[in-house]
Amino acid sequence: MPPSLAVPCLRGFCTSPHNPQAPFCLLTLLLPPLSLGAPTSTAESINQAYNLALDMQMQTSALLQTYLEHQGTPFSDPDFSSPGLSLRTLPSTDMPFEIWHGLEDGECLSLTQEAFWSFSQHFQLVKDDQSDLNPGNSIVVDQLEEARLKAKGLAGNLAGIMTALDLTTPPANTPLDSVPLGDSVFERKCRGYVIIRDYSFWTDRAVTFLGELKAKYSE
Amino acid sequence: MPDKLYVLNLIVAVIFYLPVRKIQASQVTQGVTSYGVLFGLSVLSEPLPLTPESLSVSINSAKQCLHLQWTVHNLGYHQELKMVFQIQISRFKASNVIWTENYRTTVTRNQVLHWSWESELPLECAIHFVRMRTMVDDARIPVPRFWSNWSSWEKADAQSSLGDHPLYVFPKDKLVEEGSDVTICYISRNHQDNISCYLEDVLTYGKQLDQSVRAFELKNVSFVRKTGTNFYCQGQGVTEGVVLFVSEVLEEPKDFSCETRDLKTLTCTWDPGDDTGLVQLPSYTLFESFSGKKTLCKHRNRCDWQVTQDSQEMYNFTLVAENYFRKRSVSILFNLVHGVHPVAPYNLFPKNVSATNATMTWKVHSIGNNSALLCQLQLLGEGKVIQQHNISVRVNGEYLLRELEPDTEYMARVHCAYADHFWKWSELISQNFTTAEAAPSEAPDVWRDVMFVSGHPTVTLFWKPLSKVHTHGKILSYNIVVENLDEPSSLEMLSVPAPANSTKVTLNQSSYQIHVTAHNSAGPSPASTVAISGHPGNENVEEGRINGTEDGFPMSWKPQSRNATGYVVEWCDGPQNLPCAPQWRNLGPTTTGTVISSGAFRPGVRYTFRIYEISTKRMARLLEKKTGYLEELAPSYNPQVVPNNLTSHSFTLSWKDYPTESQTGFIQGYYVYLKSKAGEKCHRGFEKTVLPDNSVCCKYTIDNPDQKTFVMKDLQPESVYEFLVTPYTSAGEGPLDDFRKVTTPDEYSHILIHIILPMIFCVLVIMIACYLKSQWLKDKCYPDIPDPYKSSVLSLIKSKENPHITIMNVNDCVPDAIEVVNKPEGSKIQFTGTRKSPTETKGTKPAYLDLLPAEKNYSGPGPCICFENFTYNQAASDLGYCGHFPVTPQAPHCQLGPLTSPENLLKTLEQNYMNSLGEIPAGEANLNYVSQLASPMSGDKESPPTNPPEPALCSEYKMQMAIPLGLASPPPSENSSLSSTTLLDPGEHYH
C-alpha cells in the first residue's frame, strides 16, 4: 500500500483529538496521495537534498564557532549560550518534537522549504552586518555566504521535490521585512548568533526528515 | 539708511532709557523687562518679556546630546543684541540641577537659537529637564542688567520611546577615543533582578542612580579590536549589551610636503601615522588659502592638486585630518618652482664608443615652457663614480666622456633637476657600455729557465699574465721572436696562444735574444727581452741560509757589477722535491735587498732563492743562492735505521738514505737513544735522559748532520737493547716513538760459527765425493757377495778327478747343527787386543754354535734355524780372526786377509772345504752343519720344544750380522738371551 500524505512524518498525530496540528492534518488530507512509485528522479532529488542537508549539518558547527569567535566576549566564551534570545522572523523552533513528527510529509516538506528560504535571507542580513562591522575580515563573511547559498539551494531542492511529488509549491517568498535586533551592533551580533543557532536546529531537523524520506522513497 | 536708522534708534533708546529706568524702576519685576518698551518706543508703560520662547528639547541618542532650540521675540526689526542665555539641566527631577551654563550670542529678531549639550550619562537612562533665562549682554546697554524670568522646565525623556524589554543597556554603538572615559548605564524593568555587567570578560560594578538605573563609569578605555569592545549585562536569562568602538587617537600628519613633476600638477604627501582602528577612516582635506580652494584627498597619505593657469606661484596649503573626535591640521607655504622634482630622463644610450671615449645621449621630459633642466651624468667603473658632469638640457642631452680605459665596462647614469631652483634630483636611469680594445700597454714580465741538454741550451720561457689595466683587451696570443746574436740573419718566431704562460725553445750554442710580446685584437704589447748565452753560466755559487719572518723572506745581496740593469729573484713556491713553475720578481738596478712573500709559503718547507743580476744585454747571471724556511719545524719522521755488524759487544747503526734536504728544518744533527733492560749506566758519550713516557734511556748527540752512521759499543752480550735515531732541527727533534730492538749474541757463538761452518762444508764435500765415487767405494768397501756357482774354485775342482763332486747347495742339505769342537788339549785360544787375558779364559768351556733350540726351557722368541754367514763376522774381520766360532789351533791361517779380498776369501773357502771333505776325520771335524730344514723334533724327539717354532721365522735366513767377540768369549750364563747362539759346556750339546 503506497503511503500517502495522510501518513504522519513519523507517527500519526492527526488521530489525536488533542493534536494542536489538526488543521495541518486536515489540510494534508486534501492533498493528493504520495505514491511510492515516484520516478527515479524524485528519489534522486531527495537523495541530493539529503546529501546537501548532511553537508550543511556538518558545516554548521564550524560556522557558529567561527562567528562567535569574531564577536568577542561574551560570544566567544567557550560555554556561550543564550537560549532566551529569539527572532520572530526566523522559522519557528518551538514546535514540539511529537507534533513535528506527526505532520504529513508534504507539510514537513513545505515547512522545511520555507525555513531554509528564510534562512538564506537572514544569512544575507548577517553577512551585511559582519561586512559593516569588520570589512577587513572575510573569514566570517565567506562562511556566511556559503551557508546562505546552501540554504537557498536546499530550499530550491525541496521545492523541486514538492513539484515532483505534485505537491503545492509554497508561494513565492517575499523579501524580509524589518528584522528585529538591529538597533545596535550588540543586537546585530546577537541576531547573527540566533540565526546561526536556529539554522543549526533546522539543518538537524532537515537531515532527519530527509533521511526518512529518502529511506521511504528508495524502497 | 537702515544703519542710520538703527543708530538713531539706539541713541534714542539710550537717551530715554535712563529716565524711564529711573521712573519705572519700581515697575520692573522678574521676568518682565522694559527694553521692549524702549526699543518699541510704543508703549512705555508695558514692559515686554525677553524670555526665550518656543524652547524645545530634542534628544540625539547617537551623540548623547540634548538639543535645545528657541527664539527670542520682542527684538526690534533689523536689530542685533548680544545676549546671554543661562541654561539649567536637571536629571531625574527638576530640582536636581546637574548643569548650568551661560550661552552668549548675538541675537536678531525671530532668530531660532540652538544649543547642544552632551550628556556623559546616556540620555536613555534618565529623564532630563531643561530651562533657561536671558539677559542682555550688550555693551551698548548700560548696567545694571537683569536676568529675565526662567522659562518653564522642558522635559527630555528618551525612556518613553523604549519598548517593554526587561533590560536595556546604553549608549549603543558609541564611538570613543582611546584613553577617554565612558559612562554606561542599564535600565532594568524588573527591579528584583540581580544583574551583573561585564566589560568584555571583566565584571564591572556601577553606581545605582535610580531604582531601575545603574551607571558604570569606564575610565581610560583602551582599544581591544576593530569590531568593538563588548559591554554586556546579564539578568535572569536576559543578556543585553552594547558595543563601544574605541578609536586610537588621530595623529597629526607628519612630513607634509608638496612637489611638482611637471609644473602642472602638485602632489602633496604625508605620513598619516598609525591607523585609528575604526571602520570609519579619518578624512584628509587639502586647503589652499590663497585661492581658497580645497580638495578631499582620495588617499590617506597623498593628495593631488591641479595647478591652474593663472600663474600662481605661491601656495599656502593646509592639510586637515579629521575623524569623529578631532581634527589635525598641518600647513606649509609652497613655492611652485621651488618644488620641482622632474620626471626621470629616458633613452640613455652610448654613441661612438672608442677605446678611450664615448658619447652619451639621453632625453628629458619637457617641463613648463621648455624650462632647462640640470642633468648630472655619472660614470661608474666597478661600482664607483669616477666621473661626474653637469649638463644643462632642454630636450636632448649629450656628453662626450673622455679618458676612459680600453676594454672596460662602465656604467653611465643620469638624473636631472630643475635648473632654476634645485629641489630634488629625478630618479636615475643607467646604461652599461664597454670601451673598445687597445694594444696592451706594457711588456709581459718574462723569465727563463735554461737547461743544457747534450750541450744545447733548452730555454723555458715563463711570463706573467698582464694585469687588467695593461691588457686593454683580451690577450689572444704571445709572440716569441728568437734572435741569434751570432747570426743576425737568423730570426725565429713562434706564437703561443693565450692563456699559456710558458713555452720551451731549444737553441744552439750561440748567444740569443728572445723578445716576447702579448697580442690582443688591437695589436702587440711592447716587447720583453731576455738574453741567453749558449754556454752554461756559473751555477756554483755559495748557498747561504736565510730565515723567514712573518712578512716573508728578507734577503739582500752584493752587487757585482756596476752596470746591472736590474736583479731578479727566482724561487719556487712548492717544496723543493716537487716540480713547479718558477716564481720571480724583478727588481731595480739600485736594489740590493727585498722581502719575498707569497701566500703559498708554508712552514716546514725549504725554499731556495736564486738572485740573478741582469746585464745591460739582458743576460742573467746567478749572484747568490739562499735557502731557508719560513719557519723551521721539528722533523716529522725519523730515518729508517738498519743495525748491522752485530757482535756481542757492539752493532752499527746506519741511516744513509735519510734525505736531510727535504726535511722540515735544517738538520743540525741526530740524537741516538739507547735503552737497555738492565738499566745500566750510560756509556761514555751518552747522557741519561728521561723520555716523555717517563722511561729513562741514554742519549748520544751527533752534531754533524752529515754523519749518518753510529757504532754502538761496549754492549753486554746476550742483552736486549732498544735504540732510536732521531734528527733534530732548531725547532726540536723527531718523534720518539719508534724504538727498535736488537739483541746482542753470546761471546762464543762466533767461534762456533767459525768451526761448524767449515765442518759442514767438509762433510758436504766428502758426501759429494762419495757420491761421485760410489762405485769405486763399493768395490773397495763392500763388494758383492761372491756366488759359489760362479766361483773359479768350482772349475778348479771340476778339473780334478772327481766329476761328481759338486757344490753343496744350502737348500739341499739339512744341517742339524754346526758343532765346533774345541779340543781342550793343547788348544789355547790366542786373543790379541782383547780385554781379557788368556788367563782369564782359563777354564773356558768348549763353544758350540747351535742352530736349534739349545735348552728345553728356552724362552726366546722361538726356535729359528739360521744360517749365519760368519764370513762377515765383523769382529773376526777386525780382529783378524774368522768369526767367533771356536777357532782351533789348526786354523791359524784364518788370521788376516781372508775377508779383505776375494782372493783370500776363495783361499779360505778352499782350505776349509778341503779340510772338511777330506783331511779332517769325522771325529775330529770342527764344523758340522745342522740342517736348516730339519725340524727341531727330528733332532731331539725326546725333548719337545716348549715353544713351537714359528714357520715365518724359520723360513728365512737370518741376516748376516757381526757378533762381537766379547759375546763369544766370556763364559755365558745359562739364561743368556741370545736367540741363536748358546754357549754350552764342553761335552754337552743337543741335537
Image (spheres, coloured by chain):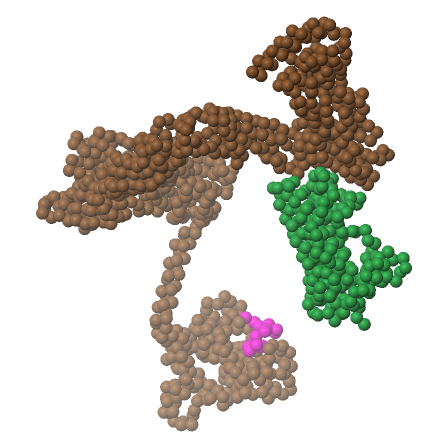
Residue at x-position 71% and y-position 13%: B43
Q: Is residue B517 left or right of residue B247?
A: left
| Residue B781: quarter of image | bottom left
Could you tell me if residue A54 is visible in this image? Answer: no
Residue A213, relative to residue B735: is it above or below?
below
Percent coordinates x, y for residue B824 in the rendering: 53, 77
Magenta stretch secondary structure, dominant: loop
> What segment carries the magenta color?
B970-985
Residue at x-position 50% and y-position 26%: B292
In the image, residue B829 lies in the stretch drawn in magenta: no
Percent coordinates x, y for residue B505 in the rendering: 20, 49
Front residue of this view, candidates A13 and B724? A13
Q: Chain B, which colour? A: brown
Could you tell me if residue B617 is visible in this image? Answer: yes
Front residue of this view, candidates B578 and B693? B578
Looking at the rendered image, the quarter that the C terminus of chain B falls into is: bottom right
- Please give the letter of the chain rendered in green: A
Percent coordinates x, y for residue B395 in the rendering: 31, 36
In the image, residue B980 lies in the stretch drawn in magenta: yes
